[in-house]
Amino acid sequence: MKISAGIIYFKFTGKNEPDIFLAHSTGKFPFYSFPKGEVEQNEELFETALREFEEETSHKPVSNNKEDYYFLGSIQQGKKTVFAFAIEADINAECCESNECEYPIGTGIMIKELDKYAWFSYQEALVVINPNQIPLLEILLEKVR
């Protein structure tokens, strides 16, 4: 089974519920997600989350200190387990750029892994995020209220 880890940025803009930073995978995928990726051999979950955030946004995470983050646990997404950490932070969605990946796999064609970045209100995020990831947003909301 595959294991992924990532970071959810959130911020408060005068509302009770936080805004959520999400990214969209290049292609015809219907949903947004948070920057995340597969855990490499001998890599810890938090290390993966930090590395993947930088690879997928071109920005270093605001903190490398695990204690600054909320650990949101994990969800099942198909054949993979996805772990999430969250931190209150801001990022300019217009200044993000992702790494490249081979797609379709085996073709040698390289594309940007992510093609869109945006901030969404909490309620909007519940609509646009991969439905499997909604429990992570619900846990985040409980922790920051």
Image (cartoon, grey):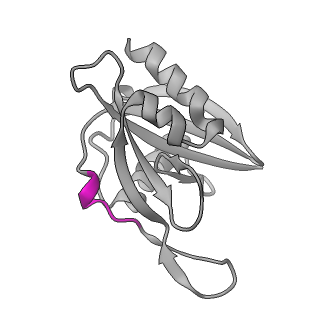
Q: Up-down: is 22 above or below 13?
A: below
User: Residue 74 magenta-drawn?
Assistant: no
Extreme bottom residue here?
108
- Answer left or right for 80 relative to 129: right
Q: 34 or 120: nearer the eye?
A: 120
Residue 26 pos. (x, y %)? 51, 66
Q: Which residues are magenta?
A: 93-98
Residue 15 pos. (x, y %)? 27, 19
Q: In the rendered image, which quarter is residue 5 located in? A: top right
Quarter of the image that includes the C terminus = top left
Q: In the rendered image, which quarter is residue 116 located in? A: bottom left
- Answer left or right for 85 relative to 132: left
Residue 31 pos. (x, y %)? 56, 50
For image coordinates 65% across by 78% down, the residue present is: 104
Q: Up-down: is 103 above or below 7?
A: below
For image coordinates 44% across by 41% down, the residue present is: 7
Residue 62 pos. (x, y %)? 26, 42
Answer whether residue 140 is visible to the viewer in this image.
yes
Q: Up-down: is 83 above or below 71?
A: below
Q: 80 or 22: nearer the eye?
A: 22
Answer whether residue 73 is visible to the viewer in this image.
no
